[in-house]
Image (tube, grey):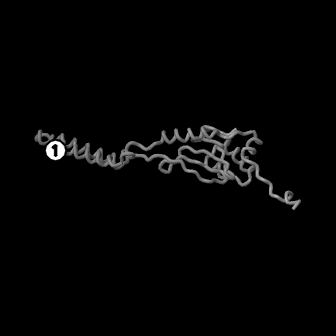
Amino acid sequence: MPFDALVAPARPRLLADVLSEQGLAPVNWQTLTEHKRAQLETFKPSFWHQHQTWLPVGLIGSVGCMAASGGFANRIMPASMLPSWLALGWMCVIAMLVVFGVFRGHAGSQWQERWVAGGWLRALGVPEPIAAIALSLHRDAPGSTLILGELVQEEVVLDPYLLLARDGELVCLGIWDNGRIIACAG
């Protein structure tokens, strides 16, 4: 039909076109990849988390050694009760350290991504320059979604970034840490 071209739906603009119209350049993917790798290295699991079977062995072994040394010292010096009291006191100190979690081993960190609504950006702690760019691009690119990536270690968010996605295209809008902007589209 000759008039089919007049009623065909308009093809959506590419995210690269939307960014260039606003005079913005996305954060380089290499920057994001290097940042994610460096943060995973910084927040890697502790020695005790990596060797969890050795923690109870070490703690029980140290308490056993203290008890044996206290008994041995008491046998050598039967007139004095001081060495056995010292061993008992030391065992109590170690027990308290274990009870209060001084010997905790923190787990490693992992990157998690989730979709977020544009209205939630400021409530989620996205810095104002990144949130403003994200809202403007999200408005100019209908059908796009905002993806918040977070480095999570034991339910604590350590280091987030923000992506904009539409129809298989993906651009990084910013990386920040505790309000300090590491990289921002612009």
Tell me what residue is drawn at x 22 percent, y 46 percent.
64
Where is residue 170 drawn, in percent x and y? 66, 47
Residue 77 sits above or below residue 53 on the image: above
Closer to the camera in the image, 164 or 7: 7
Image quadrant holding the N terminus, namely: bottom right
Residue lying furthest front = 1
Residue 4 in the image: state x and y as whole percent.
85, 60
Residue 94 seen in the figure: yes
For residue 36, above or below residue 146: above
Residue at position x 32%, y 46% from top? 54
- Looking at the rendered structure, the kind of residue marked 1 is Gly
Q: Residues within 10 Å of mark 1 (few under 14, many from 20)?
A: some
What residue do we see at 72% from left, 44% from top?
A: 16
Q: Please name the residue that numbered disc 1 is placed on.
A: 71
Instruction: Say which of 73 and 103 sits in front.
Output: 103
Q: Residue furthest right?
A: 2
Kind of element beneath mark 1: helix
Question: Where does residue 58 sit, x and y in percent of width and height?
Answer: 29, 45
Q: Nearer the viewer, residue 41 or 81?
A: 41
Residue at 61%, 49% (x, y): give it: 148
Query: Residue 2 lies in what quarter of the image?
Result: bottom right
Report whether residue 118 is seen.
no
